[in-house]
Amino acid sequence: MKMQPVKSSKINLIGYDKQTHKMRVSFRQNKLADFCYVPEGVFSAFLNSRSKNRFFKRHIQNKFPC
């Protein structure tokens, strides 16, 4: 899974595997989190969101457990 750097005060990198629909988020506090069965549209919206942290909290956190 290729990780991409993003501009965010809380999130450092995000990655997505199109085949497995698995997403990984790397936080600036050296914490990694994996999310499963994430629709590609949700990942794209996350990647293009103005506030990554706000989008994460509203649309991803606690919604795609592995």
Image (cartoon, rainbow, N blue to C red):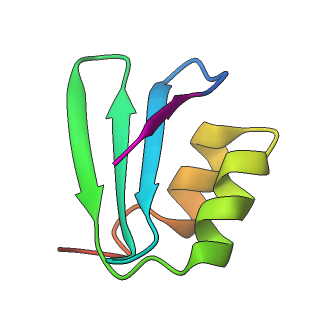
Front residue of 41 and 17: 17
Residue 24: percent from the left, percent from the top? 33, 50
When the figure is inspected, residue 25 is found, relative to residue 34, above or below; the finding is: above
Tell me the chief SS of the magenta region: strand
Front residue of 58 and 31: 31
What residue lies at 46% left-to-right and 30% top-to-bottom? 13
Which span is picked out in magenta?
1-5
**Magenta stretch holds residue 2:** yes
What residue lies at 65% left-to-right and 54% top-to-bottom? 46
For residue 9, which quarter of the picture? top right
**Magenta stretch holds residue 44:** no
When the figure is inspected, residue 54 is found, relative to residue 19, above or below; the finding is: above
Would residue 65 be found to the left or right of residue 47 on screen? left
Residue 54: percent from the left, percent from the top? 64, 46
Front residue of 57 and 22: 22
Front residue of 29 and 25: 25
Residue 49: percent from the left, percent from the top? 78, 48
